[in-house]
Image (cartoon, rainbow, N blue to C red):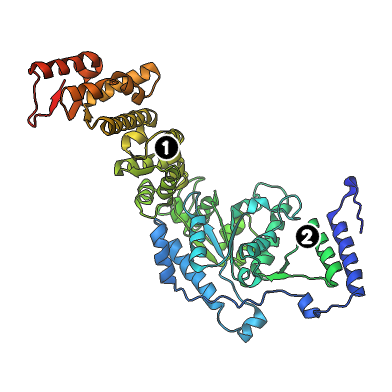
């Protein structure tokens, strides 16, 4: 079969129609050995999964990972557990007639408060397939942007092709506020309203073909398979039991709620005035959201009607960010430790360092995402430089957070000194210690000469192994005076040894110079 499509007039719909007509001709000419029922399969033979998790159990699980958001966690745990546990009940006669009401969820909250993280945790705990999409990527037709039905197909892929598992999964759509019709636009906002209507069908109940109409390669593959087998296989996914969760920051929604609340006040209100008792913060206003507020925001009534459950998440304070860092389950700290462990380096964080990092993140006003940004800014150069050194452990302190550019050289110098001391002890069986002043002076020499502190030590103390043995010392402290003139200090030690005038320490085997 040869199909020609000239570029100027190429129309995917016409090509699809041509493929379907060709398929029908072949199908009519060939017998269907499997029978019509098998040719119109809508699900696999895998039994539907059974759920028994209780809301309090899921809420306790979320408490281990997510700081604050108590009300949102309670709402999500209750309604999501109810949705999945209800699937194990036998069909109700009335429900078959009038249909069922799904616990689809609308989540409202600023960026970085853990909306996506919460749903990922829930899907993982329930063991159901999960996909995430951004509402901004969809268009009404599906050709310019994406097709909303692609989310269902992605869910099947996440379920490893098991349609029955996919039909008990979770689809999460972020930035849903971006498809609200613009309140400033003149006339209907057709594109955004069209995406809402397309999502509306999925959120209630519809059947989605696994092979997308705009997937030309998939359509041609179906035709070739039909030519081989003599049947047209159409696999479909029913969205009746798929739970849909949508979320967004909803900037400006608090203003709409505030105006509605102020309209209920008695008496004249000048423009911009706040009614006493109603000047709540954004979190308190969002907690009072109603369907009418969302309609004014730009959503269609049918769309909001398919989202009966609303969970409001609150902004995170500096104390909340610090609690996230201190948590044993902190994904920010655990991820960064894993980054360094990939190079064989173990890192620890002092509590003062966590406090400083939380302050940096709070200043960015991006919620928990600010924690990731703050940690990366502080430790990026460490992550770049340390794998090429002998450092295998270091501790992040408040000084590290305050001035990482200065703390990194200090760490490298200290690591170079520790490596030199360990190598010296292994080669000569003599234990070296360095005073703080000696360390500072060696670091200054390294910076001035553009070399590592280990190289400076090798150059200054090249003869010290033999000389300290001649002096009969098992331990020796390197002071600033020794660094200033190492040759003279060593000569004095050896001379004093043989003249018997060198000063001994209390244990008889250590001298300072």
Q: Position of residue 305 (x, y in %)?
A: 61, 67
Front position in the image: 392 or 300? 392
Which quadrant of the structure image shows residue 228? bottom right
Front position in the image: 483 or 467? 467
Q: How far apart in space, not on screen, are marks 2 and 1 (Cα)?
A: 46 Å
**Residue 75 appears anywhere in the view:** yes
Q: Position of residue 208 (x, y in %)?
A: 72, 67
Left-right relation of 486 to 300: left
Front position in the image: 84 or 232? 232
Mark 1 is surrounded, within 10 Å at the Cα level, by few (under 14), some (14 to 19) or many (20 or more) other residues, namely some
Residue that sits furthest to the bottom in the current view: 93
Picture quarter with the N terminus: bottom right
**Residue 301 appears anywhere in the view:** no
Q: Which residue is mark 1?
A: 379
Above or below: residue 475 compared with residue 230? above
Picture quarter with the C terminus: top left
Front position in the image: 60 or 476? 476
Q: Residue at x 54, y 73 (%)?
A: 83
Above or below: residue 170 compared with residue 257? below
Q: Position of residue 202 (x, y in %)?
A: 67, 66
Left-right relation of 22 to 54: right
Q: Position of residue 436 (x, y in %)?
A: 23, 26
Which quadrant of the structure image shows residue 355? top left
Q: Which residue is mark 2?
A: 218
């Amino acid at each position: 079969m040869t199909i020609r499509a000239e570029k100027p007039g190429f129309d995917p719909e016409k090509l699809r129609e041509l493929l379907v007509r060709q398929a029908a001709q072949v199908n009519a000419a060939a017998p269907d050995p499997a029978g019509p029922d098998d040719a119109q399969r809508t699900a696999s033979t895998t039994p539907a999964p059974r759920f028994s998790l209780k809301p309090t159990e899921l809420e306790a699980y979320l408490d281990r990972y997510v700081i604050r958001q108590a009300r949102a966690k309670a709402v999500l745990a209750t309604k999501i557990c109810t949705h999945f546990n209800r699937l194990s009940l036998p069909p109700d006669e009335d429900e078959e007639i009038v249909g069922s009401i799904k616990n689809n969820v609308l989540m409202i909250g600023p960026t970085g408060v853990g909306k996506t993280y919460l749903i990922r945790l829930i899907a993982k705990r329930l063991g159901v397939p999960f996909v995430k999409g951004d509402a901004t990527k969809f268009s009404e037709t599906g050709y310019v942007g994406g097709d909303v039905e692609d989310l269902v197909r992605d869910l099947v892929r996440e379920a490893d092709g098991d349609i029955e598992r996919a039909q008990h999964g979770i689809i999460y759509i972020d930035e849903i506020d971006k498809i609200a019709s613009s309140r400033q636009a003149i006339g209907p906002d057709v594109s955004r309203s069209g995406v809402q209507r397309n999502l509306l069908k999925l959120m209630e109940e519809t059947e989605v073909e696994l092979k997308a109409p705009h997937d030309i390669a998939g359509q041609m593959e179906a035709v070739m398979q039909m030519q081989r087998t003599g049947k047209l296989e159409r696999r479909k996914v029913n969205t009746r039991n798929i739970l849909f969760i949508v979320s967004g920051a909803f900037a400006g929604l608090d203003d709409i709620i505030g105006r509605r609340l102020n309209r209920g006040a008695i008496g004249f209100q000048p423009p911009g005035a706040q009614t006493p008792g109603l000047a709540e913060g954004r979190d308190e206003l969002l907690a009072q959201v109603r369907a009418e507020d969302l309609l004014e925001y730009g959503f269609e009534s049918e769309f909001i009607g398919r989202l009966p459950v609303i969970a409001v998440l609150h902004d995170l304070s500096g104390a909340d960010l610090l609690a996230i860092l201190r948590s044993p389950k902190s994904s920010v700290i655990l991820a960064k430790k894993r980054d360094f462990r990939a190079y064989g380096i173990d890192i620890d964080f002092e509590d003062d360092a966590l406090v400083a990092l939380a302050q940096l993140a709070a200043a960015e006003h991006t919620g928990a995402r600010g924690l990731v940004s703050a940690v990366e800014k502080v430790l990026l150069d460490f992550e770049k430089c340390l794998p090429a050194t002998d450092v295998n452990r270091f501790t992040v302190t408040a000084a590290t957070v305050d001035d990482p550019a200065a703390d990194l050289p200090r760490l490298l110098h200290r690591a170079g000194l520790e490596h030199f001391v360990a190598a010296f002890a292994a080669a000569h069986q003599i234990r070296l210690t360095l005073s703080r002043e000696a360390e500072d002076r060696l670091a200054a020499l390294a910076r001035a000469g553009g070399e590592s502190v280990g190289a400076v030590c090798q150059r200054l103390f090249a003869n010290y192994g033999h000389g300290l043995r001649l002096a009969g010392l098992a331990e020796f402290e390197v002071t600033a005076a020794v660094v200033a003139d190492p040759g003279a200090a060593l000569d004095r030690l050896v001379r004093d040894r043989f003249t018997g005038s060198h000063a001994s320490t209390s244990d008889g085997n250590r001298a300072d110079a």
